[in-house]
Amino acid sequence: MIQERTKIRVRYSETDQMGFVYYGNYATYLEVGRVDVMKKAGISYRKLEEEGIGLPVREMNIKYKQAALYDDEIEVITTIREMPDRFITFDYEIMRGDELLITASTTLFFMEKGSNRLTRMPQKMHDQLKPFFS
Amino acid sequence: MIQERTKIRVRYSETDQMGFVYYGNYATYLEVGRVDVMKKAGISYRKLEEEGIGLPVREMNIKYKQAALYDDEIEVITTIREMPDRFITFDYEIMRGDELLITASTTLFFMEKGSNRLTRMPQKMHDQLKPFFS
Amino acid sequence: MIQERTKIRVRYSETDQMGFVYYGNYATYLEVGRVDVMKKAGISYRKLEEEGIGLPVREMNIKYKQAALYDDEIEVITTIREMPDRFITFDYEIMRGDELLITASTTLFFMEKGSNRLTRMPQKMHDQLKPFFS
Amino acid sequence: MIQERTKIRVRYSETDQMGFVYYGNYATYLEVGRVDVMKKAGISYRKLEEEGIGLPVREMNIKYKQAALYDDEIEVITTIREMPDRFITFDYEIMRGDELLITASTTLFFMEKGSNRLTRMPQKMHDQLKPFFS
């Protein structure tokens, strides 16, 4: 497996009038987390797109335990547990100190940009991830 | 059960550079859908909050089948299948014409604002929903 | 000149913890307004992009008079006062009933997609707008 | 005057289908910048709100010179040039390395939460800012 931790400061724009982070905005925190775990393996999502591969989300599940508040420093812990093939699954915990706020998972697929068709993981990305799953 | 249909025009701000609606923005469409299905039963979420009751989300699950595009007219079909008690579950389909884009569900709980504690559904809301579940 | 009025219902996601619409989210309402005023002249912004022309914003000015609140029905009144040339300026008022919430203006330019270079307004768009400025 | 520099990594959620940061999302970057320049003077915006003072925006002006792109590291340089009284004005530059992307300014006022009325800057905040303007 491969895991990365990302610190994020909650922005005012991310709150709603209940005084919590708006429930849909956690999807953005998850995105930041998964970009970071890929960077840890030497994979730039930006470059992946420039080379014609997109990673659309196919499924997202979020459990909300506690709400994040404005100006909180939270930490997204992102894990890839299994070597991806046509799909790649990320698991997440969002913490505020020792307190668990969110558990979540997302599954994404590899898409050929232009045709928008399902494709395989690029060989280079495969080689970069492989050492973490042996 | 109770069901409502809500038409939404996709805004430019809701797209991302992949050319699709950003995956986190569907949460907003779901919110619009569930406010509308409550309105159908005579329940104003705005008033609910003014009377001291919030409805935070406890769980969200989304399956992405097809991407919505800029300027698409999509339709959120929101259903409450079971009479809510302490929790209220909404099921959703998002369509573009006959094409299914999204299936989703969210579970929310009743929260006493101020104390932020779990509470019961207000009696009035119970009475407004009851006729749909007999 | 050409003017269009667009009704918008404020979404929960657009509020912040002050209980108002987040100040940055009015930019989205302005976008919805200017797409609508162009539609009135028979111009589809979506098609414009498909034909290779983008309309990036070069300048935005907003004066906030009163705050929009959750579930408010607001109206964006969008006006093009002068026949556009290389630049196109939209003026906006956002109202809640008779109450003026926002005055704003944005200036956009025509950009050739791909090269990202400044370009002229397409001839067809010129012809569609011309009748409103005589 | 008082000035602070804040580094921000552009998120995927902040882009739009033109491939740039959506023009309305810069307002969030400005918010992050002004919270940081206040922190430099020892002022916590979060505490300010907890003590009953809000800082709504009264006016925003943005000039867009160059677009920020996904995954760019940008820097918000936020400056308070004049000792605030009833109003507080922030000037901004957003840079990508040596390249100027954005110039902007926002004027905010002090609002008593609850009554939503214009009020004076709190004495403590006055004392924290005063040393920077002599």
Image (cartoon, coloured by chain):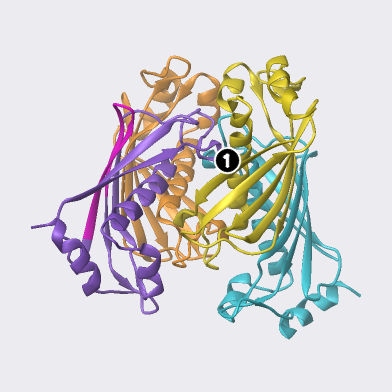
Chain colours: A purple, B orange, C cyan, D yellow
Q: Residue at x 64, y 27 (%)?
A: D41
Asked whether D15 or A51 is in front, the reply is: A51
Q: Residue at x 55, y 40 (%)?
A: A13
Picture layout, residue C47 above or below residue B49: below
The reply, left or right, for residue B10 in relation to residue D64 is left
Asked whether B43 or D37 is in front, the reply is: D37
Q: Residue at x 19, y 68 (%)?
A: A127
Picture layout, residue C123 above or below residue C61: below
User: Which residue range is magenta in the image?
Assistant: A88-105
**Mark 1 residue element:** helix
Q: Is residue C51 magenta?
A: no
Going by the numbered disc 1, the residue's amino acid type is Val
**Dominant SS in magenta:** strand
Task: Decide: few, some or many residues near mark 1? Use Cα within 10 Å; few <14, some 14-19, many ≥20.
Answer: many
User: Whole-percent x and y of residue B18?
Assistant: 44, 67
Residue marked by disc 1:
D32
Q: Is residue A101 magenta?
A: yes
The reply, left or right, for residue A71 in relation to residue C65 is left
Label 1 marks which chain's residue?
D
Q: Could one spot residue A29 in this view of the protein?
A: yes
Residue that lies at the very extreme toward the left in this rendered image: A134
Picture layout, residue C101 above or below residue A37: above
In the picture, which quadrant includes the C terminus of chain A? bottom left
User: Whole-percent x and y of residue C82?
Assistant: 86, 68
User: Whole-percent x and y of residue A51?
Assistant: 37, 75
The reply, left or right, for residue C86 in relation to residue C43 is right
Asked whether B122 or C61 is in front, the reply is: C61
The reply, left or right, for residue A110 in relation to residue C118 is left
Number of marks in the image?
1
User: Whole-percent x and y of residue A108?
Assistant: 28, 60
Asked whether C56 or C92 is in front, the reply is: C56
Q: Could one spot residue D116 in this view of the protein?
A: no
